[in-house]
Image: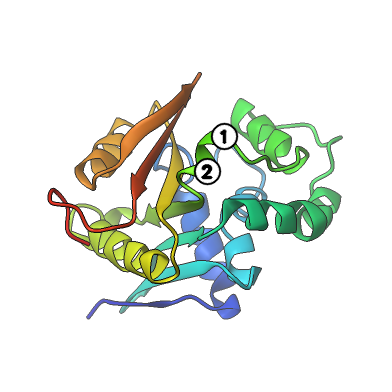
Amino acid sequence: MHTIRPLRLSDNDQVTNICGRTGFNGGETRELIREDGIIANYFALPYLAYPEALALGIDTPSGLGGYILGVPSTDAFNQWMNRHWLTNVRNRYPVTLEPQSDFEQFLLDCIHRDCIFPDFCAGYPGHLHIDLLPALQGQGWGRALMDRFLQELREQGCPGVHLAVSTNNPGAIQFYLALGFTVIQEEPGTMFMGRRTKRTKNYSC
């Protein structure tokens, strides 16, 4: 029996594990980074600590199988990250660390650069991250998480949400397109996609 439930701080270890197993274009990061924490402390664990975050997970008989994490206001979240969260993360992973891969260098760059508020956030102020272990992919659980997440954003008055996806992850791009997301900005290697949180004729949430 699988169920969707809110995540708690006690889920840190399971969330870290999923992030490490899915964080590189939807696949394993462990040959590329020194430990799962270096990716989870930036892309996942802040959402279990930030008071205004929305964090939902899929419980399975064998443990947590996936999650969706995000916030209704990227601006407020980024201010919190810059003022509070990133200080400890930077101490744990100093800029002087010798990266084990280009991907780990990317993560170190993220950690040691203040979060910014892109122009497109005015229309899509919320943002999200979603990761599922392979055993749950292709079974409708990603859509179910997105349904619940968008509903909660809508109830909080958030008009739109965005995400970033690697251009080397075509499966994820197709998944987001099928859920009503559109491309709002592109950079080398990265595609930013967004959608409104209100109900649409083409996609019901």
* Picture residue at 46% right of the left edge, 52% below the top: 129
What is the crowding at mark 2: few (fewer than 14 residues within 10 Å), some, or many (at least 20)? some
Element at badge 1? Answer: helix
Q: Amino acid at mark 1?
A: Asp
* Picture residue at 58% right of the left edge, 64% below the top: 47
Residue 100 in which image quadrant: top right
Q: Which residue is mark 1?
A: 119
Q: Which residue is mark 2?
A: 122
User: Viewed as shown, does residue 167 lie left or right of 79?
Assistant: left
Query: How many callouts does the rendering have?
Result: 2
User: Viewed as shown, does residue 103 lie left or right of 145?
Assistant: right
Q: Amino acid at mark 2?
A: Ala
Considering depth in this image, is 162 or 132 the residue closer to the camera?
162
Quarter of the image that includes the C terminus: bottom left
User: In the figure, 51 relative to 102: above or below?
Assistant: below
Quarter of the image that includes the N terminus: bottom left
User: Viewed as shown, does residue 122 lie left or right of 82?
Assistant: left
Considering depth in this image, is 28 or 137 the residue closer to the camera?
137
